[in-house]
Image: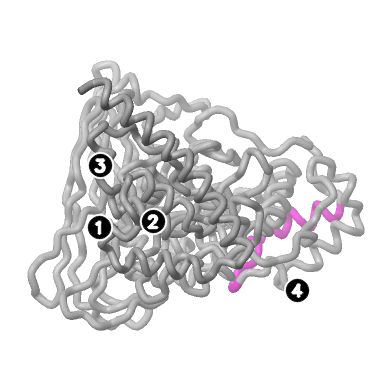
Amino acid sequence: MEYKIHPAIGIARVGSSSEFFIGPERPFELANRGVTFKDFFCRIKRQAVRFRIFEHRDDGTSVDVTARAQITWTVRVKNRKSTKSFVSGASFGGTEMDSGIVEVTGLNDSRPLNASVSFDGGVPIPVSLGEVRTDASGCLIFLGGSGIAGQRPGNTTPISSTGSSGWYDDTCDGYVQASMTLDGEIHPVTPAWVVAAPPKFAVHHTNVVTMYDKLFDLAALGVGQPTSYQYGVRPILQRAYDARYLTSIPDDAHDWPDLGDFSTLPPARRQAIVDRLKPAGDMPALENLQLTATQLKWMQEFADSGFVPDSLDPPTHPAITAEGLDRAALDDCIGGAFGPGVEIAEPVSYWFPSTSDPFRVPSDYSPGRLTFGLPVPWHGDAFGNCASYWPIIHPGTVRSSTGARVDWNRLVSSTDIPGTWDRVAIVAYDEISGEFREQDCRIRLREIPPLRPRAWRWFPPLELIRRVIDIVSDPSPIDFLRLARLGRQPIARATDPDLLTRLAQHLEHMSEAELRSAAIDVQAQAARLEVARQMIDEQLRKRR
C-alpha cells in the first residue's frame, strides 16, 4: 500500500481576474459547462488545480483519503525564463523567481507565492506567482498569477515568440509535497508537480495530440491492448471535427456522418481518412505535428475493422479517480508541437525511462525546469502566428456569440499585447446553439450591482466603460451609451480623451445600417432609462 498525490502533474492557468474555476477533473468531460470564464469586468478568470491524496492498495484499487487525513502541504515554484534564452543560450539578464518553501495545513488555510526578479544587479521587482489554499475537505488548491508581462526600467527589447531580454512574466512550475497523518500513523506520500501556464482560450477543446497521448505512447501503454472505438478512435475523429470552430477550414471538412454510428463510415472511407494522415499525408493540418504511433495504430485498425466496437456513446468517466485526475489534467495540455511549447517546454521524452510512473515528473527535477525555455513573456508567442500550431490554446478564426466567423484576436493591440491580451473572448461550448462560440462579455444593465441612491449622481467608473468598449465580442457603442445615460451625465462630461477616441473609432467602422440600428436602440434605451430615473427621483422625494 502506498499514498500518492493526484493529479501527478497539475495544470493551473494564469488570468487577469481574482476569480477562478477548477480545471478538468474527469477525462473527456466538458468541464464547467455553463460557467462564464470572465468576471463582471470581462477579466479572464484563473484556472485552478486541486490536489488530493489517494491510497493505492495492493489489489490495484485506490481511494481518496484527503478528507480523513491531517495534511501539511508544501509547495515551491520557480520561474527561470528571464535568466537566459533556451534557444541561443544568450543571457536575458534576469534572476530566477523563487516562491521559496510555502506550507499550508488543515482546512481553509492560504498563503501567497511571493517572488521577485532583478536584472543585471538592479533593484528587485516584486512578482506574485499566485497562491495556495486548502479547501473545506483539506485538498490543496493552487492558483497561478495574473498573467502579467513586465520589463526592467529602460528596456527597449520588443517581445517575440522565442523570448525577449529584459522581460518577465508570472508563469512557473515546481513540486507539491505532503506530510500526512492517517488513523494516527504518519505515511510517506509520493509528491506531484504543478505548472502555472498561459490561459487556454478555447476551454472546451482538446488538442488532436494531448500531453497524455504523448506520455501514453512513450510508455508503450497501448502495446498488446485492443483498439477501443469509444476511447481510442472516436476522440481523434471528434477533435478533428471540432477544429472547424477554431480555424478557417470549411464547415464541410471532417464532416463525419455520425460518430455515434461508425457503420456510416464504411471501410473504404475509413482507409481514405488514414491515407490522409501524416507522415504519408497532410493531416493533422498543424505545423510540426502528427499523431503518435499509438494513435496511428488505432486509426489503421479502425480502417481494417480490427477495432473493438465497445460503445457508440461518447467516452465518459463519471467518477473522480486517481488515474482520471492524471489524465484530465494532461488531456488539457498540448502534446505537440514543441516549438518550444505552451505549458511545458521540456520535451517529455527526456524523462524516459527515468521513472516507473510515466505521468509523474522524475524526483530529481528542480522547480522551474518544465517551463524554462518557454517564451518570456508568454504573450509574445500567444498572439503571434500560432493558430497553425495550437488553435485550442490560441485560436485563429472563431464563431462569435452570434455564430459569425470572426478573427479571435481582433481586439488585441499589436503595439501593446501585454496591456490588451485579456480583451480576447473565451471560446466555450454554447448550450443553446450546440456549437463552440465566443462567450459574449457585454456588460448589461441587469448585471450592474444595485447602487445607493446618491451614487446615481456620479458618472460610472471609466474602467467599466473601457471594458464595455474594448472587450465586447461584437464592438458596439450601445453599451457605452447605456452606461453614460445610467450615470445621468452627458457624454461630453467624460474627461478621458482616449475613451472618446476609441468610441469614435468603433462608430467609424460601423455600416450605415448598423449606425441607424444603433441609433434606434440607443433612443429606446434612453427612453427606458429616463423612466427609471424619474421613478428613482420619485422615491427619493418621498424619503426626504
Mark nearest the camera among 2 and 4 is: 2
Image height of 316 relative to 279, above or below: above
Label at residue 197: 2
Amino acid type of the residue tagged 4 in the rendering: Ala
Determine the secondary structure under disc 1: strand
Residue at (27% x, 21% y) in the render: 542
Determine the secondary structure under disc 4: loop
Amino acid type of the residue tagged 2 in the rendering: Ala
Residue at (30% x, 68% y) in the render: 497
> Which region of the structure is painted magenta?
287-304
Determine the secondary structure under disc 3: helix
Q: Check if mark 2's residue and mark 1's residue have beta carbons within 8 Å.
A: no
What x and y, as percent, mark residue 257?
85, 49
Query: Which mark is first along the chain, 3 or 4?
Result: 4
Image height of 512 relative to 364, above or below: below
Give the CA separation, mark 3 to mark 1.
Answer: 48 Å
- Depth check: 483 or 522 in front? 522
Residue under numbered circle 1: 78
Determine the secondary structure under disc 2: strand
How would you rate the neighbour count of disc 1 (Cα within 10 Å): few for under 14, some for 14-19, many for 20 or more?
many
Decide whether residue 217 is among the magenta residues.
no
Label at residue 280: 4
Residue at (77% x, 62% y) in the render: 253
Query: Which mark is first along the chain, 4 or 2?
Result: 2
Give the CA separation, mark 2 to mark 1.
Answer: 12 Å
Q: Check if mark 4's residue and mark 3's residue have beta carbons within 8 Å.
A: no
Amino acid type of the residue tagged 3 in the rendering: Arg
Specify the quadrant of the image occupied by residue 185.
top left
